[in-house]
Amino acid sequence: MTTSATSLRLHGFFRSSASWRVRIALALKGLAAEQIAHHLRRGEQRAESYLRLNPQGLVPALEIGDATVLTQSLAICEYLDETHPEPALLPGNAVARAHIRAFAQVIACEIHPLQNLKILLRLRKHGSDEEAVQGWARDVITEGFTACTALLPTAATPFCFGATPTLADLCLVPQMANARRFGVDLTAFPRLLAIEAACMALPAFAATAPELQPDAE
Amino acid sequence: MTTSATSLRLHGFFRSSASWRVRIALALKGLAAEQIAHHLRRGEQRAESYLRLNPQGLVPALEIGDATVLTQSLAICEYLDETHPEPALLPGNAVARAHIRAFAQVIACEIHPLQNLKILLRLRKHGSDEEAVQGWARDVITEGFTACTALLPTAATPFCFGATPTLADLCLVPQMANARRFGVDLTAFPRLLAIEAACMALPAFAATAPELQPDAE
């Protein structure tokens, strides 16, 4: 089954790295989507009208027509890859795909959830001061990027896993932007920086960057 | 490509809920795997011999022969589903699969990483006392299960998404066990309890339970 590009509506926020993942996937697939911004710091994702669409009140969410709403960025990217197979976000055989998914999941399950807005607010509620909160985020990202580096193939390729960007790259690049926001020392990760540079040379990554979105501040 | 069952070696820990996910997937597929236990509280996952296999020092990891090691529980489950399609962990069309993956990712990306051993140690390091740490875990799980419930189809089925267990169920059941360990009030989630009961009536879930593993304490 395929979805006509014009019926796609992406609910996101310019600075949400999970939203950026989906923007990249859409762009790589050549799919246009109407963007609807929900300002996370202002709590717009908890407006009643949005909760009717996505009861969890999170971004991103992708409306694909006939009242179907997809949530969770990686599930959305896998859906786009299944319905629009070219270019493949998960190329290769089952082992190659498992390695790509594992890299993406280090970011989506081990880094991002431990440094997103929600957990930082929770930490402050638990009594951590601003310096401790920022240090927590830096530690989590540094540890996670060390893991990411260890998961890359021995022979360096332009992108994480080969000559084309995959699900791994579309998780990595937004996480690099988050890392900079928290002041992580990225010189410790030269290979990740090289991959990021290769990605940002592509319009699918460059044109979807947070600062270029209509809701950017 | 297929993998002969006898060559599978699962590195795990009886109480690790991510390891339990993979044990269920293997059992549903009818695949035997040698189990190698790494005691997380004793730090055995950081032994040099294990780090050579999985530099991240986490469980689970699945050795599939010819020096290939797969990490990240959901990536491993997707690999098993691609190489052994029956019974399907992700049945249905692309939309159905996206809903199953989203449910699994609420648990894998939003609940589990915020209540696992690693983050609880980090919280204690940041000055939280035991009561605060346990309360944090309960809050995270309660909030996550509320999201999970909202993602279930309107018409209740025996399992999360239909008449057979999927990737969603194999994430839910181990997370329910974690919830009990932290004293979460599960009576607030009758539908999740009913799904758990349906799952635990199946040998693939019951026989892989933590307390029945060789390394259980």
Image (tube, coloured by chain):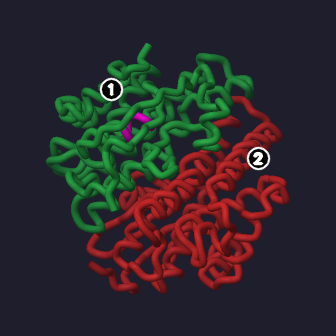
Chain colours: A green, B red
Q: Are marks 2 and 1 on the same chain?
A: no
State the residue position of label 2: B138
Which of the 4 quarters of the picture holds residue A187? top left
Q: Chain of mark 2?
A: B
Residue at left offset 68%, top offset 79%: B212
Residue A53 placement, left or right of B80: right
Span colored in magenta: A18-22
B39 is higher (above) or lower (below) than A140 = below
Secondary structure type for disc 2:
helix
Magenta stretch prevailing secondary structure: helix
State the residue position of label 1: A209
Which of the 4 quarters of the picture holds residue B52? bottom left
Please tell me the numbered disc located at residue B204: none
A196 is higher (above) or lower (below) than A147 = above
* The C terminus of chain B: image quadrant: bottom right
- The one of B36 and B174 positioned closer to us in this rendering: B174
